[in-house]
Image (cartoon, helix red, strand yellow):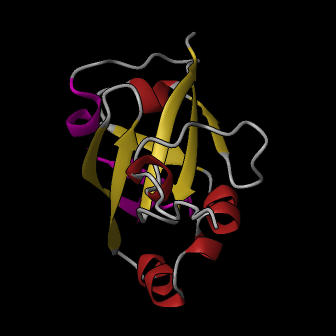
Amino acid sequence: MERKNNKTSKASSKRKNNEIFNPVSQWNIIITLTASDTDSSNTITIPKELVEAKIFPLWGSKRCKGLLKPDSFEMVHLYEHHSKVTRGVAMKKDEHGNFKLCGLPSVLGGRPFKTGDVIGFWWDTHWGRLNFELLVIA
């Protein structure tokens, strides 16, 4: 009787740390950078409708409620695919109800984005972080 090898390789049993952008995912957030995103404010604004539809359903209710309180923020791990670096940034609600990711220079490592660049964001439920990738260079 022949015995089968039931061992799995490490590569197949572990989830990759650098899952790439899936262009057909319903959870994508696509942002075209505006002048206010690329000025010296060091923030990127994400419309509230996108955060509420594509991130909040993947978070716990406590985390969502905390972010909606006045003058509050949530620390978010942001993974940038180009540099393969994860950094903590603050996500907070602005005066218009949209959400800002604050502290981007720590993630970008001096690599500037330009007005018109298109960035894709998606929440990684396995690692509990917000992944992003530059999709189109202006």
Look at the picture and state if 31 lies above or below 68. above
Left or right, residue 5 beside residue 49: left
Which quadrant would residue 2 be assigned to in this image? bottom right
- Outermost residue toward the front in this view: 1
Task: Name the quadrant of the C terminus.
Answer: top right
- Outermost residue toward the top in this view: 138
Towards the viewer: 73 or 128: 128
Task: Name the quadrant of the N terminus.
Answer: bottom right
Residue 131's x, y, as percent?
A: 47, 46
Residue 36's x, y, as percent?
A: 46, 31
Residue 95's x, y, as percent?
A: 48, 61
Look at the picture and state if 34 lies above or below 18. above
Left or right, residue 66 beside residue 49: left
Towards the viewer: 85 or 18: 18
Residue 53's x, y, as percent?
A: 71, 65
Count of marks, rendered view: 0
Identity of the residue drawn at 51% across and 43% down: 19
Look at the picture and state if 53 lies above or below 84. below
Which quadrant would residue 81 be assigned to in this image? top left
Q: Which residues are magenta?
A: 91-109
Towards the viewer: 50 or 3: 3
Look at the picture and state if 104 lies above or below 77. above
Identity of the residue drawn at 50% across and 45% down: 45
Is residue 2 a member of the stretch shown in magenta? no
Identity of the residue drawn at 38% across and 60% down: 91
